[in-house]
Each structure stands twice: as structure tokens, then as C-alpha cells.
């Protein structure tokens, strides 16, 4: 069973944007989609480690700012034909609060 | 809700492409059933030639395997021929009794080879060249027999003959006309081609008419044994391949009463006379033409899919085609109207000894046709000129010498690589991503790629700086032959999310007064809910440049550099380039920079190519602090990160220099201050030199200003980057005020008409320098209006660094959240 920790308010993340969460095990990119879903992935692109938090978010896909790989937020998988995977973290919304599983 | 039913008859290249396009748009709209007479899934028919030649094998050429049909829930009836359509009941019937109902029917039955009506045409050993079964029959015959005769010396016939020869047969090509490939080549090119093929061991009999195919002894199976011509000559033939043309497969449509005239007649949406029935591919006759090459069929597929998906966008208006013979080691290319007529002129280069022949057919100031033999490296370039109907008036003198000589100086990073076909497989094509030719060719063949976009996605070649795009196009063209079709550049869709071109999107934003990205997407029927990383920044730019102070800038639609007002580095840190107006600085500014560099432990401090100082390797969280410190010394953003005004380089000018005729530094500072905060389709760089010695390099800037004794000369559309372009003379003015007004008017026109990511040199090439001069130089009132519109757009522009320092809401972008437990 994972422990849930309150991380921030939904409005701390810009819609269609992201925030960086500094964690003990490295940076995590926290995203908020156009329809207010939240996702969290390790802030390192499977290609060459680019900071995914800095990419452009469209739907549930972020485009890495360095060389344009597209990463699906649900599972961290690179969109074909690229191949690779970024670690994901469980996050949820409870009302206006965003929680992360530790 | 039950899905509508889509039935497709003919499981070939055009049909399956239509389904692929449809699934991209509306994956869940239809329940799809496919009938194919051949017992195979869809394969790449054009690669039957390399298979016959032994260069590829059959499994390599499958385009959509059985898994594809399954994954997309498509019912495939492979090996079943549809024999009847009941249009009233909306139902089709196959020969084996299978029945399927449809709401929409797609006919993609292709064509059948034409068989000469001569005695003996049905003998064993007499075949056509169309499908896998024919290819297998040829391969088998090559193992058992010696003499092959190919009737017809068009593309198909020659490829068949070449393949059979490579498989060891003694091959004679028989042709009715006086020279080979007479529908694609003129006589000079054809004679050269014939010589090369003869050198490969093929024999030719030209001007010969077949009278009869003669059977061999009954006890040997009654197989064909010889061919007799009208003139009485007889030659041995244990295999006869008829490659004398194709006929659209219209029998099925005709029997159902659908209007056909040399093909199933379709309109610009690929709809037949029965609105429930569509037709694409070789079976369709569009404006009187049934095409026999895949490139136009794929264009049809795209349009047809859009209408099947009920989007109703896009019309197919016909295609210009090109052909290329797929015989390894021989390069023949032809496109457009290569025979010419009384309204055309020809430029010909003929070097029979060197094995090169080139003919360009020109009407007025456009290229309308081309034939290349021996050296086809520029085929893709000519084809693009032809399709775009580009005005070639100015480059006519160099046209024959190809893209490399057409008026531009450099294409850096690709020195010595202009001939895609002769490049070694190990040669690097894309310098940014390290992709070599072999990798690209392999991907094209194995994955069945047909467009530069697809090659880009699968190999990464030309996906970064783009300077190798031309080379990638050439490789694509030489690998897929006539299947290659460049997109008309000016009509290119913005991205995969829409059918609309940049021009159409700009016009809609202006004409319908659209003010936000969701509005544009709604009004123009975007196919994705919130776009992609390619269209969002473009739309954002079009909105803010069309409706300054009205449309909201959307930070989430900007690339990170423009959102963070700094350049992202490979390690995720940022670089900071404060503005130094005109390249001038002061001890106070230098001191502030030095202090910042120490305080924030900036790893690298460097002079940029833009004549200012770069602080590289700053953490994102430190950016607002760095800016606050620099701001104390009066420094603002240098926008080294933006599609915006970058730098105005200056020389010392008449302020100090013994040759200076004008105050270059002061002119440069005035220009840079005027343009501060200007967003543009791409970055904009200026330079001002005090005399024609031009120490500020004004000759390769978007706007270059050169002081002369009587005033200033203005140059526009230079570029010092990927492809060096010398700026073109624009006009001469006398005062500083005029420099400001003319430069601003030119840049405003570019801001209003330029497509996103189009530098001024590309913009000017697209619309023509004369058209721009007419507005900016000759028309004083319009110049004045443009100038004022730019000043209005730039009014009250706030330095983005200072804004982030002052406003907590903007600062959030730079702050991190924290959690310790993970
Ligand atoms: C910092 C600088 C190199 C340097 O150390 O000198 C630089 C750095 C970059 N250039 Fe440049 N260019 C720099 C001067 C130039 C110049 C020279 C000039 O400005 O006089 C050119 C050729 C002149 C021109 O543009 O016409 C130049 C032509 C390019 C191009 C090719 C543009 C083209 O249209 O062909 C790109 C790619 C692009 O923009 O798409 C590019 C792109 C880049 C980017 C932004 C690549 C990127 O997207 O990340 C580089 C950022 C590096 C970083 O990590 O910060 N840079 N770049 C120079 C900054 C100048 C400044 O003060 O603002
Ligand atoms: C050897 C060879 C080399 C070629 N090289 C090139 C080249 O280099 N460049 C180029 O652009 N083009 C080339 N072509 C032409 C290209 O292959 C065709 O233009 C293209 O395949 C046509 O696509 P289509 O879908 O219209 O027809 P097809 O691919 O022929 O598909 C039609 C399918 O429908 C099936 N069918 C027909 N009637 C029925 C029915 N009643 N019921 C069920 N199924 C039916 C047929 O069996 C066939 O499988 C080449 C062709 C050949 C044969
Ligand atoms: S600074 Fe410019 S030239 Fe140098 S590596 Fe980066 S993009 Fe290439
Ligand atoms: S690091 Fe993300 S695409 Fe290269």
C-alpha cells in the first residue's frame, strides 16, 4: 500500500503546463492537462535526459524540449517510432488538492 | 450506437492507404470489411521489381500485415473477388457467396494488364507483370527456361526484362515504337538508355509488331515456345511477359450501373455518381485521367479519407507526375510535359560520351517538364519547381546546373554531397542526428515510407536543423522512384492536426477576428483536441501578430526558451544574454555581469556571434535572481532565445572610424530600441555598417544597412545560417528617420505575411522581392501604415525579465515544489 502525500493545489500548476517537484530521488515533472487531469513522470527524457517538465504539453503527451521526442504521460512511454520509457509516479486529485503516492 | 459499415473492394495500395488515413482521423466511425482478390495482405506492388531482380524478398514488401487488420478490427476477405454490387440493397457479393452490407462503399480495384489479342495469348508461359503470382511465375520460369521475351519497353517492361536478365535468362525486349519508353523519354535520352541496358545484356527489337505466340510440342505441356512477328521473323520464347499497358478495372462498377469512362468517374472528393460509393486508385478516372503511379493515388487517398471521415475538407485537383526507372545503376527521371509544344522552349545538355542527357522544358517563366538521364541528382529539385510553378526567371541561367548552383552560396555541413544516388551507404546525411544514407534507404524500403515526413519520423534524418532535407528528398526519390511526390510547399498543411496551410490559417485569424487558440481550432476544425508542439506556437504567433493588445499571449504554447526567456541547454540549465544595444556596453554593465557570474557560479562566460555576452549554465531557479541583479544595472532581455528581434550589429562607424560616412553605432541603437520586443515568424537580425567596407556584415542580415556618403543603402533577406544567402539590395534612403521607417515597414510586412518559422530570405523568395518593394518602397502611404502598425504593436512592451522579477505569478514558472519522501 502506498502512502499518499498532499503536494500542492491544482492551481499551483498552470493548465496545459507543469511544475518541477524536487524530490529526494531526483526531479519529478508534474503536469496538468487541458481538462485538469494530473500526471507525474521522472523529469528525464528517455532519449538524452532532457527535462520533460519544460516541454509543450498537448493532450496527454509532452514533447521533450531538447530533440522533440513525444512522451505519453499515462505510462511514460515514448510515442512510436521512438522507443523508451520514463518512470511514472501515481498522483491524484482530491478536490483542489493534488496528492502523490510515496 | 451501432457503427456505420464501410466495405472496400480491392485490397491494394490506394485502398489501404485510404483506410490508414481514415483511421488516423476517425478510428471508430466505421466497421470495416475488405475484399481482396489476391490471397495476400496489402503489399508494396512497386517493389515487385526489386523482388524480381533479387534485391529484396517477398516478406520485405508487405505494407500492412495480418496483425494490422486485426488490430484495427478490419475484416479481411483475402482471396475473394467481389462479383456484384446491389446498390439498392447496399450490399456486395463475392464469387464464393460471401455477402457484406455497406453504408459506404470504396472501390479500389486497381487495373489489369492489357493482353494483346494475338493467337496464343492464353498459352502456358504467357503472363503479365502485375502481382505476386506473376512475379513468382517469372522467378520459376527463370530456373527452368532460357529464352524470355518482354513485349513493351515502358517502365514496367524494362524492369521485368532487367529482373529476368539478372536471374540468368536470355531476354529480348520487343517494342512497337521507334524508341523505348517513348511515353516518358525523348529519343536522345531513350537511345542512351538503350545502350546502357544493352551493356547489361538485354536485346532489343524495335518497331516490331507481334503476330502470334507459337506453342511448343504437346508432350512438353504445350507451353509457349516462340514468337512470330508481322514481318515473319520468329524468335524462341519459353516465357512471354506482356507489359503493353493497363486498363482500369471497371467491370464491377459498370455492371452495377456506375458511370465509367476509362475508369470509374469521380469528382474532386473521389465520390462516384452514386454518393454512397467512392473510388480511389488506378480504377478511378478524375477529370478524365486515371493515374498509374502511386504518388497521385496517395493524394487521392488522403482526400477520400477526409470525406469518408465526414470532415468534408479538401479537394483533389489532379497531380503532376514524375517517373523514375528502378534499374540499379541506371538513372532516368522524367516529369511533367517533357516533350514540349509550340508554346514551350527547351534547354538541353547532351553529353553522349559522358552518358549524360538533360532536357528542361520551359513555358514563359516556369518549368513545365524535365527529362534527366545519367545524372538525376536534381530530379527532386526540378520536380518541386515544377509543382510549385515557381518563377524561374531569375535563375534561368543556372537552372541546368541544378539546385547547388541556383543562386545561393552555401549549404553548410553537406560539402561534396549533392548526388544522393552515388553516395556511399556509410556517408552521413544528417549531421545533427548522425544518420547515414544506408539507414535511410533501409527504413524507406522496410517500412514502406513515401514522404519526407515519414522518413523524418522513422530515422530522425532532417528532423533537427533541416539543412539536409533536400538530400533526404533526393534519397527518397531515388529509392521509391515515381512513387515520390513532393508536397506543394506553399500549400503544406501546418502539421498533422489540420488540413489547412499556414496561409489559410493566417487569413482565417484575420478575416474572422479569431482571438484564441481554441477559437482557431474550433473554427478550422482541428483534428486534435489541443494541437501539437508544432501548431500551437505557430497559432500563438499568428494571433498575437494579427491582433496585438487584443489576443492573449499563451505561455503554454511557446517553446520553453520563450516561456523562460532564456535558452535551454543540453543539461537542462539555461543561458542568459542581456541586451547590449547595438553591441555597445559600459563599465557599469560589465561590472554587473562580472558580479552575477561570480555570485551564481556561472560556469561559462562567452562572447556570442551576435556581439554580446552570454552567461551559460544557469539554473532555472536562479534566473529571476540573475535578472534582478542585471536589471539593477539597467540591463534587459536580449531575446537570444526568441523568434523575435535578436541583435543589431554595428561597426564603429563615423563616430570613430577614419572611413566612416554615417554614425553606424547610433543608427544601430535607434533601430534596436525601436524593435525591442518584436515577435516575428522567425528570428530577425540586423546590422549597420558605416561604409561599404561593411565590417558589421550587413550583407547576410535580415535587414542590412550600409552607410554611404549620400545616406544609407538598405538590404533585405540575407541569412548567415544553415544556407548562406546574400541580402538583396532594397532601396536607398537619405535620413536616419527613413531607415527606421523602411526597415520597420519591411519587417511589419514580414510579420503579417510570413509563415511561422520562415526566415525573411524564405519569405522573400516565396512572395517575390518586387511585390514587397511595390508596397514598402513605391507606396508611401502603405509604408507609413505598416510602420505605424509595428509601432502600435510594440507600444508598452514590458521587458519580460523585469516582469518576472516584479510579478510573483510570473515567477512561479521558475520555482520548484519539494517532496522528501520519494
Ligand atoms: C549563442 C550563439 C552562439 C555563440 O556562442 O556565439 C548562438 C546559439 C544558438 N543558436 Fe545561433 N547563436 C548565435 C549566433 C548565430 C549567428 C551569428 C549572428 O547572429 O550574427 C547565426 C548566423 C546568422 C543568421 O542567423 O542569419 C546563427 C544561426 C543559427 C541558426 C540558423 C538559422 C537559419 O535561419 O539558418 C539556428 C537554428 C534556428 O534558429 O532554427 C541557431 C540556433 C541557435 C540555438 C538557439 C540552438 C537552440 O535552438 O538551442 C543556440 C543556443 C545555444 C545555447 O545553448 O544557448 N543559430 N546563430 C550566438 C548568439 C548570438 C546572440 O548574441 O544572440
Ligand atoms: C512491377 C510494378 C512496378 C511498379 N513500379 C512503380 C513505381 O516505381 N512507381 C509507381 O508510382 N508506381 C509503380 N507501379 C504502379 C503501382 O504499383 C500502382 O499504381 C498501384 O499499385 C495502384 O494501386 P491501386 O490500389 O489502385 O491498385 P492495386 O495495387 O492493383 O490494387 C487493387 C487490388 O484490387 C484487387 N481487385 C480488383 N478487383 C477486385 C474485385 N472485384 N474484388 C476484390 N479485389 C479486387 C486486385 O487484385 C488488387 O489486389 C508499379 C506496378 C508494378 C506492377
Ligand atoms: S551554438 Fe549554434 S552552431 Fe553551435 S552547436 Fe549550437 S546550434 Fe550548432
Ligand atoms: S532528450 Fe528528450 S528528445 Fe532528446
Image: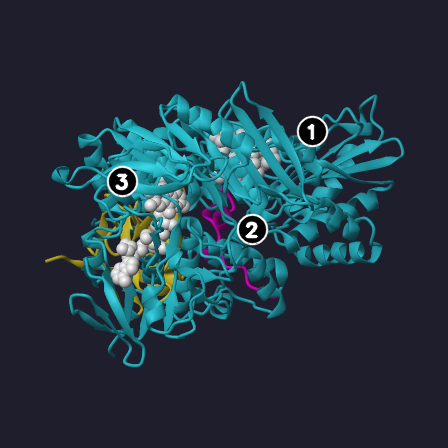
Compare marks 1 and 3 and give the one earlier in the sequence: 3
Give the letter of the chain under mark 3.
B
Q: Colour of chain A?
A: yellow
Give the letter of the chain under mark 1.
B
- Circles 1 and 3, Cβ within 8 Å, touching? The answer is no
What segment carries the magenta color? B550-566
- Quarter of the N terminus of chain B within the rendering: bottom left
- At horizontal 52% and vertical 50% (from top left) the residue drawn is B320
Residue denoted by label 1: B697
For the residue pair B592 and B228, the one nearer the viewer reads as B228
Residue B224 at x, y percent in the picture: 23, 39
Compare marks 1 and 2 and give the one earlier in the sequence: 1
- Residue B756 - label: 2
Q: Is residue B231 visible?
A: yes
Q: Residue furthest top?
A: B353
Residue B485 at x, y percent in the picture: 46, 46
Identify the chain drawn in cyan: B
Give the letter of the chain under mark 2.
B
Compare marks 3 and 2 and give the one earlier in the sequence: 3
Q: Residue furthest front?
A: B232
Residue B90 at x, y percent in the picture: 29, 77
- At horizontal 83% and vertical 36% (from top left) the residue drawn is B712
Q: Residue furthest bottom?
A: B88
Disc 1 to disc 3, C-alpha distance: 78 Å
The verdict on label 3 being within 8 Å of ligand 2 is: no
Amino acid at each position: 500500500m502506498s502512502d499518499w502525500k498532499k503536494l500542492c493545489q491544482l492551481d499551483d500548476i498552470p493548465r496545459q503546463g507543469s511544475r518541477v517537484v524536487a524530490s529526494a530521488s531526483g526531479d519529478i515533472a508534474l503536469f496538468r492537462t487541458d481538462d485538469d487531469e494530473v500526471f507525474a513522470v521522472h523529469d528525464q527524457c528517455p532519449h538524452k535526459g532532457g527535462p520533460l517538465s519544460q516541454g509543450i504539453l498537448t493532450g496527454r503527451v509532452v514533447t521533450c524540449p531538447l530533440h522533440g521526442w513525444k512522451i505519453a504521460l499515462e505510462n511514460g512511454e515514448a510515442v512510436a517510432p521512438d522507443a523508451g520509457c520514463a518512470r511514472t509516479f501515481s498522483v491524484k486529485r482530491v478536490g483542489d488538492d493534488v496528492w502523490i503516492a510515496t | 450506437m451501432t457503427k456505420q459499415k464501410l466495405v472496400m473492394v480491392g485490397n491494394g495500395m490506394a485502398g489501404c492507404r485510404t483506410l490508414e488515413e481514415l483511421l488516423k482521423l476517425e478510428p471508430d466511425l466505421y466497421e470495416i470489411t475488405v475484399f481482396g482478390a489476391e490471397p495476400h495482405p496489402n503489399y508494396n506492388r512497386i517493389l515487385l521489381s526489386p523482388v524480381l531482380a533479387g534485391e529484396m524478398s517477398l516478406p520485405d514488401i508487405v505494407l500492412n500485415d495480418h496483425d494490422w487488420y486485426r488490430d484495427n478490427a478490419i475484416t479481411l476477405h483475402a482471396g475473394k473477388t467481389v462479383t456484384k454490387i446491389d446498390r439498392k440493397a447496399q450490399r456486395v457479393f463475392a464469387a464464393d457467396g460471401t455477402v457484406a452490407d455497406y453504408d459506404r462503399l470504396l472501390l479500389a480495384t486497381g487495373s489489369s494488364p492489357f493482353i494483346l489479342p494475338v493467337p496464343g495469348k492464353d498459352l502456358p508461359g504467357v503472363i503479365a507483370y502485375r502481382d505476386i503470382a506473376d512475379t513468382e511465375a517469372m522467378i520459376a520460369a527463370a530456373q527452368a527456361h532460357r529464352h524470355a521475351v518482354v513485349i513493351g519497353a515502358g517502365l514496367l517492361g524494362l524492369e521485368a526484362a532487367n529482373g529476368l536478365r539478372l536471374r540468368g535468362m536470355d531476354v529480348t525486349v520487343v517494342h512497337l515504337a521507334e524508341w523505348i519508353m517513348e511515353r516518358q523519354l525523348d529519343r536522345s535520352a531513350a537511345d542512351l538508355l538503350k545502350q546502357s541496358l544493352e551493356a547489361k545484356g538485354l536485346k532489343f527489337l524495335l518497331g516490331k509488331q507481334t503476330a502470334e505466340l507459337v506453342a511448343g510440342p504437346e508432350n512438353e505441356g504445350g507451353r509457349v515456345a516462340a514468337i512470330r512477328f508481322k514481318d515473319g521473323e520468329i524468335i524462341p520464347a519459353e516465357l512471354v511477359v506482356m507489359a503493353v499497358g493497363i486498363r482500369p478495372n471497371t467491370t464491377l462498377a459498370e455492371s452495377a450501373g456506375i458511370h465509367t469512362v476509362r475508369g470509374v468517374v469521380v469528382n474532386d472528393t473521389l465520390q462516384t455518381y452514386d454518393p454512397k460509393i467512392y473510388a480511389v486508385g488506378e480504377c478511378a478516372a478524375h477529370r478524365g485521367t486515371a493515374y498509374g503511379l502511386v504518388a497521385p493515388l496517395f493524394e487521392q487517398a488522403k482526400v477520400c479519407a477526409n470525406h469518408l471521415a465526414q470532415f468534408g475538407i479538401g479537394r483533389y485537383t489532379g497531380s503532376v507526375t514524375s517517373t523514375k526507372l528502378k534499374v540499379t545503376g541506371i538513372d532516368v527521371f522524367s516529369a511533367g510535359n517533357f516533350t514540349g509544344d509550340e508554346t514551350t522552349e527547351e534547354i538541353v545538355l547532351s553529353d553522349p560520351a559522358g552518358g549524360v542527357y538533360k532536357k528542361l522544358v520551359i513555358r514563359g517563366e516556369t518549368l513545365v517538364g524535365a527529362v534527366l538521364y545519367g545524372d538525376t541528382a536534381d530530379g527532386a529539385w526540378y520536380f518541386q519547381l515544377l509543382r510549385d510553378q515557381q518563377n524561374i526567371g531569375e535563375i534561368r541561367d543556372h537552372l541546368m546546373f541544378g539546385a547547388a548552383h541556383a543562386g545561393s552560396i552555401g549549404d553548410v555541413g553537406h560539402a561534396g554531397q549533392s548526388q544522393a544516388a552515388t553516395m556511399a551507404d556509410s556517408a552521413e546525411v544528417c549531421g545533427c542526428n548522425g544518420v547515414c544514407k544506408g539507414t535511410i534507404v533501409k527504413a524507406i524500403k522496410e517500412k514502406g515510407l513515401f514522404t519526407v515526413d515519414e522518413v523524418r519520423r522513422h530515422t530522425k534524418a532532417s528532423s533537427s536543423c533541416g539543412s539536409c532535407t533536400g538530400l533526404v528528398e533526393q534519397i527518397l526519390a531515388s529509392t521509391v522512384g515515381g512513387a515520390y511526390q513532393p508536397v506543394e510547399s506553399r500549400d503544406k498543411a501546418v502539421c498533422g492536426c489540420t488540413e489547412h496551410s499556414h496561409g489559410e490559417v493566417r487569413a482565417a485569424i484575420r478575416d474572422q477576428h479569431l482571438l484564441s487558440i481554441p477559437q482557431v481550432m474550433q473554427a478550422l476544425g482541428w483534428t486534435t483536441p489541443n494541437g501539437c508542439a508544432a501548431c500551437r506556437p505557430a497559432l500563438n504567433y499568428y494571433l498575437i501578430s494579427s491582433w496585438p493588445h487584443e489576443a492573449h499571449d499563451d505561455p503554454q504554447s511557446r517553446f520553453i526558451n520563450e516561456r523562460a526567456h532564456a535558452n535551454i541547454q543540453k543539461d537542462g540549465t539555461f543561458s542568459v544574454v542581456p541586451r547590449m544595444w547595438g553591441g555597445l556596453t559600459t563599465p557599469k554593465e560589465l561590472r554587473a555581469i562580472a558580479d552575477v557570474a561570480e555570485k551564481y557560479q556561472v560556469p561559462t562566460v562567452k562572447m556570442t556571434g551576435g556581439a554580446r555576452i552570454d552567461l551559460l549554465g544557469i539554473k532555472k531557479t536562479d534566473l529571476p535572481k540573475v535578472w534582478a541583479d542585471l536589471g539593477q544595472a539597467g540591463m534587459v532581455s536580449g531575446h537570444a532565445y526568441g523568434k523575435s528581434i535578436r541583435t543589431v550589429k554595428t561597426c564603429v562607424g563615423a563616430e570613430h572610424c577614419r572611413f566612416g560616412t554615417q554614425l553606424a553605432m547610433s543608427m544601430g541603437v535607434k533601430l534596436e530600441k525601436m524593435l525591442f520586443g518584436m515577435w516575428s515568424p522567425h528570428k530577425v537580425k540586423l546590422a549597420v555598417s558605416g561604409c561599404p567596407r561593411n565590417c558589421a556584415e550587413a550583407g547576410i542580415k535580415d535587414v542590412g544597412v550600409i552607410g554611404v556618403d549620400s545616406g544609407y543603402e538598405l538590404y533585405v533577406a540575407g541569412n548567415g545560417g544553415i544556407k548562406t544567402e546574400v541580402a538583396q539590395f532594397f532601396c536607398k534612403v537619405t535620413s536616419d528617420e527613413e531607415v527606421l521607417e523602411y526597415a520597420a515597414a519591411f519587417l511589419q510586412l514580414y510579420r503579417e505575411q510570413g509563415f511561422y518559422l520562415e526566415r525573411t530570405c524564405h519569405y522573400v523568395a516565396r512572395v517575390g522581392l518586387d511585390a514587397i518593394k511595390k508596397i514598402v518602397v513605391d507606396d508611401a502611404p502603405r509604408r507609413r501604415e505598416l510602420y505605424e502598425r509595428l509601432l502600435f504593436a510594440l507600444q508598452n512592451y514590458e521587458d519580460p525579465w523585469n516582469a518576472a522579477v516584479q510579478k510573483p505569478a510570473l515567477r512561479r514558472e521558475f520555482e520548484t515544489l519539494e517532496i522528501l519522501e520519494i
